[in-house]
């Protein structure tokens, strides 16, 4: 027979208030770091190659009036 007991830190009331949500976010904040800002540079066209589109996706787009004609 399986042991169905489990322990969780999540509240049993999933409809918590805003203060509860803010507390959850504050506890999780140290676990997530923002990446360093970087400047996006354009990619040379010579590096863009080998793009394949599955046949099902191509048929889907062909069937859409905005894309098919």
Image (cartoon, rainbow, N blue to C red):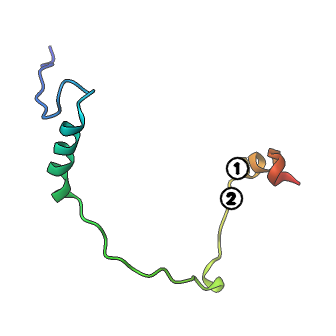
Question: Mark 1 — residue?
Answer: 57
What residue sits 61% from the left and 86% below the top?
Answer: 44
Q: What is the number of callouts on the image?
A: 2
Q: Which image quarter is the C terminus in? A: bottom right
Q: Position of residue 15 (x, y in %)?
A: 27, 27
Q: Which mark is residue 2?
A: none
Q: Which image quarter is the N terminus in? A: top left
Q: CA distance from mark 2 to mark 1?
A: 7 Å
At mark 2, the secondary structure is loop
What residue sits 24% from the left and 64% below the top?
Answer: 33
Up the image or down, 6 lies above or below 52; here it is: above
At mark 1, the secondary structure is helix
Question: Mark 2 — residue?
Answer: 53
What residue sits 65% from the left and 72% below the top?
Answer: 50
Are the residues at dot 2 and dot 1 in contact (C-beta closer than 8 Å)? yes
Residue 68 as seen in the image, left or right of residue 28: right
Q: Nearer the viewer, residue 9 or 58?
A: 9
Q: Nearer the viewer, residue 56 or 13?
A: 13
Q: Nearer the viewer, residue 37 or 55?
A: 37
Q: Position of residue 45 (x, y in %)?
A: 65, 83
Tell which residue pokes out farthest to the right in this image.
69
Residue 33 as seen in the image, left or right of residue 47: left
Residue 64 as seen in the image, left or right of residue 40: right
What residue sits 17% from the left and 29% below the top?
Answer: 11
Q: What crowding class fits label 1: few (fewer than 14 Cα within 10 Å), some (14-19), or many (20 or more)?
A: few
């Amino acid at each position: 027979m399986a042991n169905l007991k489990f322990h969780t830190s999540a509240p049993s009331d999933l409809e918590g208030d805003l203060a509860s949500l803010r507390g959850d976010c504050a506890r999780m904040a140290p676990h997530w770091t923002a990446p360093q800002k970087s400047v996006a540079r354009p990619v040379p066209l010579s590096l863009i190659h080998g793009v394949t589109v599955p046949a099902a996706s191509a048929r889907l787009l062909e069937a859409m009036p905005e894309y098919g004609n």
